[in-house]
Structures are given as structure tokens and as C-alpha cells.
């Protein structure tokens, strides 16, 4: 039986997070953006809120509630959305295959929400999507691995406490021969370069260079040579979170625009009465509703233990672009004031725009959807890899 409603508890949680986000997070959003400063103060506020609500190691939020929370935080300060996920227990899903040994070694990282993870998959030449061709290596040396390589586009670079690094542990070519490691940001041999980005400036990105970085074998996440199985499933879930935080920013922009056009007049009439104004708003409201349902379907499928690769990829290629378009329409409907920094619209536009790229581009997501629709035998990437293997043998 279909049920499109949230539980009473979830609706209360939505209201609580929205009130908190708009009163506690929104007032300083512009400050963190203008100064490209990581919002440590806001992270602490969210951690305290989590503790006040009684969510701890054994009592973390379910996926739907995490989605609700990240959507509401997206309304207030987009740069706090990932921090909300850390503060409220998403690492439980992110590091699902982490051993108890490594969890006990870093309890403040896995359980408190006070430490930040930097996901290191993308490289300068291979890109973020062609992970099978990465060149970072992890070579065993006694009880350690020695890691060398360069990782790019790492979010929260200036605040990262632990890097989650994927490296070749050479046995085979391609995807099977990649292992994940948890690397302390204070490890010798690490050097960082921070970017000056267009948006998401409160979560500065950067490049990480690893020069003979020694990592204990116990810091391995998941199985040796099978690191991708530990992360790929979470990335499907994360696509829903990305979609929802973009929708939060778009919905808040739309709500503000509705109020603006009801009060702004032209020819002695509220401009909301003109179809050229009302129709784009109607279209945006319709698309937001449809996109939101798709996002929550991904989380629902995951909670039911069902496949969600196709739906997750649909969200990732469509929703960030949709939200960028909606926020841009809101800027235009505000006229000249919408094009200024006096309103938060331009910041939201810059922030949301980046997630058309982050966690894989729209083109890659469409390939995933096509593979799910047509079948793996019609996957061009698999076809060319097979030809390469056959040519190598001959």
C-alpha cells in the first residue's frame, strides 16, 4: 500500500530542524561564504542539538529523517548540510564496513560527529567517475601500507580530520584491486592546496598530495582489494541527500519569491497576477514536488534493502540542475535586487551549481540510468574494456 505521508514524529522533527536552521544557521550563512571560513560554530550547534534530542551511538536517525533534516538545513545555510549529516550520524552508513577495531581506535570520529571526513576518490587525470584508472598506490610494508598519489576536489579540506582514501593495492587492473583507508590528517607526508571556489565557500575544497604516507593496516575500511563495495552503495544514498539539500535551497528561494511577487506591483497590480510571473512559479512548485518524491524514494528503497542505483542516478543528474534553474528564475523574478548580494539568492545559486559536478557529473549519471534500462550488455564502457582485454590477450 502506498503512503506518501511522513510520520507524526518525522513532521515534528522537520519543524524543529527548520526552526533551528532558520534562526541559528541562516544569520551567519553570508559570513561563512564571504570569508570562505569553515562553520565550526554551526557544527557545534548541530552536535549540541543532536545530544539534546537524545541521538547517540546506539540511537541514530533513520535515512528518511536524515533526508528531512538535510533538506531543512539546505533552506538556511547550504554549507551546513553535509555537517548536519556528520552531526546526526550519517557516518554509520558511510563507514558501514568499517571494522570494530578501527571504530574503537577513533571513537570521537565515528560516534561523536565532531570530526570531519574528506572523501578522496577524484584524481587529476582519472577524474572522479573513472575510479578504475586511479593511480594512487598503497604498497604493503610490514604492519603498514605506504600510500603515494594525488587526490583532488576534496570537500571540507581546511577542516578535515580524517581522509577516506582509495588506492590501488596492486593485484589486478581495473576496479578489483582498490582498497579504502582511513588516514589521519596529521599524518606525515600529507600536503594540501585549497581552491578559491565559486560556491560552497564555507566548505573549502582542495588537493591532497600523499608522499610516502604510512598508514596502519588496521585502518583499512572493508576488505582488501574490495574497497569500492564499501562506498558505492553509500554514494547512491548520498545522491538522495544531495538532491534534498538542493531542493531545500530551491524551496526556500521559491517561498521568498512568492511573497515578493505578491507584494511587488507593476501597473498598479501585484505582479503575481501576471501569468509571466505566476507560471514559472507554478512550474517550479510542480518540479520540486516531483523531485522531492524521487529523492525520498531512493532512501525508502535503501531502507527496504532494494536496488536504488537507477533512481539515485536519476536524482543526481536531474535535481541539482533543476534547482539551479529554479533559483535562477527566482533571481530574475526579483529583478535588479535579485542580482545583488543583498539577498541570499545568488549565494544559493552558486552553492547548488557545484553539485551538478560533485559526486559525478550528469553525463556519468545518465550512463548509469541507461545501463539499468538497457542492460549491462549495452554498456559502452564495459564493451570497450572487454575489447581491451581481448586485444591484450592476443
Image: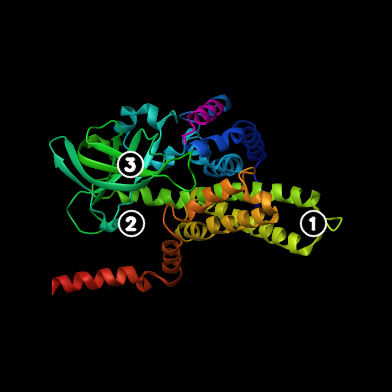
User: Where residue 164 sits in the image (x, y, percent)?
Assistant: 33, 41
At mark 2, the secondary structure is loop
Is 35 magenta? The answer is no
- Majority secondary structure of the magenta segment? helix
Q: Nearer the viewer, residue 220 or 6?
A: 220
- Relative to 65, 252 lies left or right: right
Residue at image location 17% in from the left, 53% down from the top:
171
Q: Position of residue 42 (x, y in %)?
A: 53, 30
Is residue 325 visible to us here? yes
C-alpha gap between disc 3 and disc 2: 18 Å
Vertical side of 388 occupied by 101: above or below: above
Seen in the picture, residue 164 relative to 229 is either above or below; the reply is above
Question: Which mark, by number, is residue 193?
Answer: 3
Specify whether residue 244 is in view. no
The span shown in magenta is 37-49
Q: Which residue is mark 2?
A: 127
Tell me if 10 is positioned left or right of 48 in this view: right
Label 1 sits on residue: 271
> CA gap, disc 3 to disc 1?
48 Å
Amino acid at each position: 500500500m502506498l503512503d506518501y505521508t511522513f510520520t507524526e514524529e518525522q513532521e515534528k522533527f522537520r519543524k524543529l530542524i527548520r526552526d533551528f536552521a532558520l534562526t541559528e544557521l541562516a544569520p551567519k550563512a553570508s559570513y561563512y561564504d564571504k570569508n570562505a571560513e569553515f562553520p565550526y560554530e554551526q557544527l557545534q550547534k548541530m552536535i549540541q542539538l543532536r545530544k539534546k534530542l537524545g541521538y547517540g551511538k546506539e540511537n541514530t536517525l533513520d535515512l528518511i529523517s536524515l533526508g528531512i533534516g538535510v533538506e531543512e538545513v539546505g533552506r538556511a545555510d547550504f554549507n551546513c548540510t553535509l555537517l548536519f549529516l556528520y552531526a546526526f550520524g550519517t557516518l554509520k552508513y558511510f563507514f558501514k564496513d568499517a571494522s570494530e577495531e578501527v571504530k574503537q581506535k577513533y571513537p570521537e570520529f565515528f560516534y561523536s560527529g565532531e570530526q570531519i571526513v574528506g572523501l578522496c576518490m577524484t584524481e587529476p587525470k582519472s577524474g572522479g567517475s573513472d575510479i578504475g584508472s586511479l593511480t594512487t598506490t598503497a604498497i604493503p610494508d610490514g604492519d603498514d601500507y605506504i600510500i603515494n598519489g594525488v587526490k583532488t576536489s576534496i570537500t571540507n579540506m581546511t577542516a578535515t580530520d580524517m581522509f577516506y582514501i582509495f588506492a590501488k593495492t596492486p593485484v589486478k587492473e581495473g576496479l578489483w584491486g582498490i582498497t579504502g583507508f582511513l588516514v589521519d590528517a596529521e599524518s606525515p607526508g600529507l600536503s594540501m592546496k585549497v581552491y578559491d571556489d565559486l560556491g560552497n565557500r564555507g566548505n573549502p575544497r582542495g588537493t591532497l598530495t600523499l608522499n610516502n604516507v604510512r598508514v596502519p593496516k588496521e585502518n583499512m575500511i572493508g576488505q582488501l582489494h574490495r574497497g569500492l563495495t564499501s562506498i558505492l552503495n553509500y554514494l547512491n544514498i548520498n545522491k538522495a541527500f544531495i538532491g534534498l539539500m538542493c531542493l531545500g535551497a530551491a524551496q526556500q528561494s521559491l517561498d521568498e519569491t512568492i511573497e515578493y511577487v505578491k507584494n511587488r506591483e507593476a501597473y498598479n497590480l501585484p505582479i503575481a497576477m501576471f501569468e509571466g510571473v505566476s507560471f514559472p512559479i507554478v512550474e517550479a512548485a510542480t518540479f520540486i514536488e516531483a523531485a522531492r518524491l524521487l529523492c525520498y524514494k531512493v532512501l525508502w528503497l535503501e531502507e527496504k534493502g532494494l536496488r536504488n542505483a537507477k533512481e539515485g542516478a536519476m536524482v543526481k543528474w536531474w535535481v541539482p540542475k533543476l534547482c539551479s534553474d529554479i533559483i535562477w528564475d527566482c533571481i530574475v523574478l526579483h529583478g535588479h535586487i535579485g542580482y545583488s548580494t543583498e539577498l541570499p539568492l545568488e549565494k544559493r545559486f552558486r552553492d547548488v551549481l557545484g553539485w551538478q559536478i560533485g559526486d559525478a557529473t550528469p553525463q556519468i549519471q545518465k550512463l548509469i540510468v541507461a545501463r539499468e534500462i538497457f542492460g549491462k550488455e549495452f554498456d559502452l564502457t564495459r564493451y570497450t574494456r572487454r575489447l581491451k582485454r581481448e586485444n591484450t590477450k592476443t
